[in-house]
């Protein structure tokens, strides 16, 4: 009777090891996962925000710094040396290019083409240059109009722009070298996360002006008065309006709040395919030689790879494999440390998105109304 040898009756047996990982398909249900984070309010927010940003770029950068050369139109001390004018103009211009290219990096269609790769390179280059020129300007001026508090806040925020852009570039190169085409791969997730962080910081300077103008338009706060409208600054280029309590806090809040929103979004996005935590892979010789070896209680040997963000990857070798030099039955297990789409925190992200979308519609509409009337 050979019925006892049927696979259905061998319930206590462990499955046989995979002997040809090169021919074993990688199961990936990541695309089937549905997230509860809504995209539409964020899209509405960005569209109406960029209505404001384009108007602001035209006047505050193109007209002020390139056409009229009105250096002290808003703040004092920008035109005292040729180097100050150069660094400020380049800081604003390269930052504007990065700001315009930022949303393009998140369009799924372009991510599958060379447009994403080349526009991403230009974006990261412009963001890093904007950071360098901004920090250079601060070093030349030594103390900004809001005193040492604003100088420290803007210096750290400016450094974050460059650092996050560099990490986005670095992880993109790693993802490409790893040939990580799957959106559930570790390399892709690291790159995506740093891209979100980078964009939050490149758009933060525009939000600094955006929320100030919002408070002014709706009478919520008496914002600092520009020099062209009679604002006062002393002979040391220090402006008392920027040293008030709220303005001193806002110097830090504008870029830290953008970073916080980015981290919330990253926290809610699925990092790895938690439905399929194991996929077959053949490690490179460097993986086998450099990764630390740990012995499990069952006698298996594990290569641990803890790199970067939330995810954690381990490569396990079964007890029937004598050494890492035999990669024929290697499996890499991705622990489900990232949040699933079922996380309750996504409702907070949706609420933030809806509020920002409503605010952006109201602000941009009122701005356009005031301009044309």
Image (cartoon, rainbow, N blue to C red):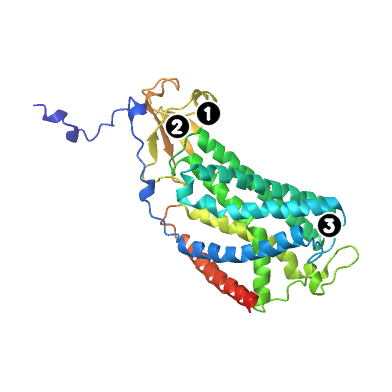
Upstream in the sequence, badge 3 or badge 2? 3
Packing grade of label 2 (10 A; few <14, some 14-19, many >=20) is many
Tell me where residue 276 appears, x and y as whole percent: 37, 42
Mark 3 and mark 2: span between their CA atoms? 52 Å
- Mark nearest the camera among 3 and 2 is 3
Which element carries disc 3, helix, strand or loop?
A: loop
Circles 3 and 2: CB distance less than 8 Å? Answer: no
| Location of residue 318 (image quadrant) | top left
Q: Which residue is drawn at the image coordinates 61% and 47% (left, top)?
A: 123
Considering every residue shown, the one lying at the far front of the view is 67
Q: Which residue is drawn at the image coordinates 47% and 53% (left, top)?
A: 269
Residue annotated with mark 2 = 315
Upstream in the sequence, badge 1 or badge 3? 3
Task: State which quarter of the image contains the C terminus.
Answer: bottom right
Mark 1 and mark 3: span between their CA atoms? 47 Å
Upstream in the sequence, badge 1 or badge 2? 1
Which element carries disc 2, helix, strand or loop?
A: strand
Circles 1 and 2: CB distance less than 8 Å? Answer: yes
Tell me where residue 243 appears, x and y as whole percent: 79, 67
Residue annotated with mark 1 = 291
* Residue 208 seen in the current view: no
Residue annotated with mark 3 = 143
As drawn, 16 above or below 357: above
Tell me where residue 275 appears, x and y as whole percent: 36, 46
């Amino acid at each position: 009777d050979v019925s006892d040898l049927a696979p259905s009756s061998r319930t206590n047996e462990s499955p046989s090891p995979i002997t040809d990982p090169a021919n074993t398909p990688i199961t990936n249900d990541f695309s089937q996962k549905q997230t509860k984070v809504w995209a539409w309010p964020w899209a509405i927010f960005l569209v109406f925000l960029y209505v404001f940003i384009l108007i602001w770029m035209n006047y505050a950068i193109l007209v002020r710094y390139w056409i009229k050369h009105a250096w002290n139109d808003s703040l004092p001390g920008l035109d005292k040396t040729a180097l100050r004018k150069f660094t400020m103009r380049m800081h604003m211009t390269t930052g504007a290019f990065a700001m315009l290219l930022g949303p393009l990096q998140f369009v799924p269609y372009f991510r599958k083409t060379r447009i994403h790769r080349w526009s991403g390179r230009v974006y990261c280059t412009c963001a890093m240059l904007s950071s360098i020129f901004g920090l250079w300007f601060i070093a030349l001026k030594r103390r900004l109009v809001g005193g040492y508090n604003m100088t420290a806040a803007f210096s750290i925020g400016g450094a974050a722009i460059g650092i996050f852009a560099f990490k986005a570039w670095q992880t993109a190169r790693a993802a490409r070298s790893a040939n990580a085409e799957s959106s559930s791969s570790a390399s892709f997730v690291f790159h995506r996360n740093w891209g979100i962080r980078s964009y939050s910081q490149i758009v933060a300077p525009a939000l600094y002006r955006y929320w100030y103008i919002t408070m002014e338009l709706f009478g919520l706060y008496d914002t600092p008065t520009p020099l062209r409208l009679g604002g006062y600054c002393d002979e040391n280029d220090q402006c008392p309006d920027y040293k008030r309590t709220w303005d001193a806090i806002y110097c830090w809040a504008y870029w830290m709040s953008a970073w916080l929103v980015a981290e919330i979004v990253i926290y809610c996005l699925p990092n790895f395919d938690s439905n399929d935590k194991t996929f077959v892979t053949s490690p490179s010789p460097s993986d086998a030689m450099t990764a630390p070896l740990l012995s499990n209680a069952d006698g298996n040997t594990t290569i641990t790879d803890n790199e970067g963000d939330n995810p954690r990857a381990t490569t396990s070798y079964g007890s029937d494999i004598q050494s890492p030099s035999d990669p024929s039955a290697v499996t890499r297990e991705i622990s489900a440390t990232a949040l699933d789409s079922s996380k309750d925190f996504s409702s907070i992200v949706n609420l933030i998105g809806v509020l920002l979308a409503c605010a952006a519609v109201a602000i941009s509409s009122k701005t356009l109304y005031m301009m044309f009337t």
